[in-house]
Image: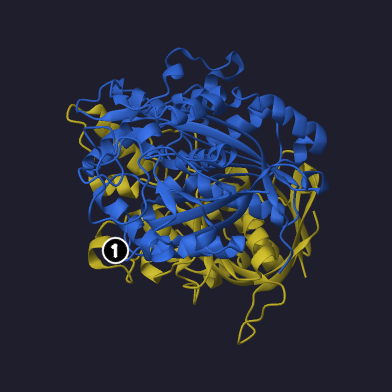
Amino acid sequence: MIMKPEIKISSATLVSALGCGIDATLKSLLEFKSGLKPQNYSQVDFETYLGEVKELKSYQIDDDYKKSDCRNNRLTQLCLNTDNFKQKVEGIKQKYGSDNIPLFLATSTSGITTTEQAYQNNSKNDNYQNTHQFFSLAKFVSSYLNINSHMSLISTACSSSAKAVVSAMEYIQAGLSDVAIVGVCDSLCLTTIYGFHSLGLLSAQKCAPWDENRGGTSLGEAAAFLILEKCDDNDKNKEIIKIKGFGESVDGFHMSTPHPDALGAKLAINSALDNAGLSACDVDYINLHGTATAINDKTEDLAIKNIFSNDTMASSTKGGSGHTLAASGIVELIICMLSIQNNMAFGTMNTTKIDKELSANIILKNTPAAINTTLSNSFGFGGNNCCLILGSS
Amino acid sequence: MKPIKLTIKSIGVLTYGIDNYEQAIKFLKNNNNFADLKNQDIDLKPIENLPRNERRRTNNHIKIAVNVALQHQDIQDTQIIFASCDGDTNISHKLCQAVSSSDKFISPADFHNSVHNAPSGYCSIAIKSHLPINSISTDYNNMFTTTLMEAAIKVKLYQKPILIVLFDDNIHPQITTSRKRTLGAISFLMDSNNSQNKDNKNICQIEINKTPKNKDNRVKNENIPFWHNPAHQAWQFLQQINNKNQIQNYQYLKNSDLQIKLL
């Protein structure tokens, strides 16, 4: 075994229905303002709420990237130009060189909207390789940021971006680099909207995790990026946010139904705690996967009850952002970072009465508290689970 | 980077006319032409270890990936990385067709099979695994080197075996005709360099390292490009093993190749 270096989040950017940028996201969270709206998505003919990024309506891809034009790459480009992220990337390029910054990206549907639109017009997607193909996101980002290092595109449904963080950490921990960029983009498309509808998993109301009347999830879209760096001596006296540990597992049970005893979820959480060298009592706040479907919340509740005491505060922020699928891992990791930086456990939007059969310590309102360590859960289709632990120095 | 040493414990191969590593090596030894394989059958067995209702839902994309994984022994306690460039474009086609229709009805089974990690999900059910499994997409020309590097990192960190599964499927012609594909898969079970099989049947030991890009130094094979599959890079590695070429360079990054040295 080799000694593992500590890894910090040195920059972050996020665009979702909660807001365009970290400050806007924090404002929505503090004001307890959900980004979910009654759906107005082209051609959707049933009632549900969606977390759309409103800025996308008038946003255009840069002229040099017209072949890559799709909703997913527009959202990606918007995000890279938010929170001064692109400028910060220029900074690390100066420091490390563009050949030494690996990229770990995630998506579940990439730019499939372009193929959907082509089919509606009885034609083909002429730019499949630059839009719909999974790896096209990685090619777009590497070209846009002018980075030429190791690149991988992780796609494990709703755990994708959390697992991209793990891959980046392992790359740094193995000594191959001192820095990595991790990012994700999953944008709304008819395929996921009608796919989740076919499984009976979409709520007609704003999703309300852990609520006794929860009727399913609400879909959202988001892009988010992080710069991860190996901690050095200069970080010793600074307030920095470190990724303390990660845990992964698979259920080995069913493609779209979680293990009834929450076996995979428990394994991933316990593995993250072991990896971080922490006990369950060290965690101050849990950002749940919390999709608000009947079975997912019930299973996750079982895992939380099994591992944590009744004192550990937990919430799902999907009532604000919607379920951003592959993006949820990094989106909620950034929300955990904001929780630590602002000493605030964010409440569970839209939930009014907790399901009596569930027993995790769900906080309904924003709760000021000393938050030093957080856990973020991501559980995806295929029984693919990933948990990340953040902590302040 | 510092060179990373790996032991290749076993190899799985599944494509037209080839059902395992031994047949692949025989094919290479006989200097056969890849173009001839297209006319042969591919043996996509039902995945026996799956419950019947799950087995019924598996398609060719899932079967080829899981069957080539199952050619290795004792993988229940092994991390796995599945790599496919395009995923299941036949399902993408069905879903895009469905959302273009008047009722927009999507089959629930098609939807849950549409995730890129569907093969890994079915594989974990078949082998009753709980260890991490990843599903990635890579560039067409460096699927083998990118996945090998990701696996090498895990071996270096955890000193435990890892299985990589490289596969791709025919692309549905309505999705795109810009890339040809043939159905094919190759898998490698690898471990740290000091690992030994009980019966000492490891295939080879290798050392991998980044090297400056030099197209002239890269492995060349006029046959392999006829095999239209992103896993073709791995065939070049099979050829390196077969020919006992001590050092070969492979396409990897824009400015770097990956060098594989047989130890």
Which residue is at 69% across, 72% downward?
B204
Element type where label 1 sits in the image:
loop
Give the quadrant of the N terminus of chain A: bottom right
Residue designated by label 1: A260
Nearer to us in this view, A96 or A25:
A25
Nearer to us in this view, A393 or A47:
A393
Which residue is at 76% across, 42% downward?
A100
Horizontal side, residue A308 vs residue A80: left or right: left
Q: Colour of chain A?
A: blue
> Could you say where residue B170 lies in the image, as x and y percent from the top left?
42, 46
Q: Residue furthest left?
A: B103
> Could you say where residue A314 lies in the image, as x and y percent from the top left?
41, 49
Which residue is at 42% across, 46% downward?
A158
The reply to whether residue B155 is in sight is: yes
> Could you say where residue A155 lies in the image, as x and y percent from the top left?
48, 46
Q: Residue furthest bottom?
A: B199
The reply to whether residue B132 is in sight is: no
Nearer to us in this view, B242 or A276:
A276
Q: Does residue A344 lie above or below A299 as drawn? A: above
Which residue is at 59% across, 47% downward?
B225
Task: Report the amino acid beneath label 1.
Answer: Pro
> Could you say where residue A5 lies in the image, as x and y percent from the top left?
73, 56
Around disc 1, counting alpha carbons within 10 Å, would you say few (fewer than 14), some (14 to 19), or many (20 or more)?
Answer: some
Horizontal side, residue A301 vs residue B73: left or right: left
Q: Does residue A173 lie above or below B13 as drawn? A: above
User: What's the chain of the residue with tag 1?
Assistant: A
Q: Colour of chain B?
A: yellow
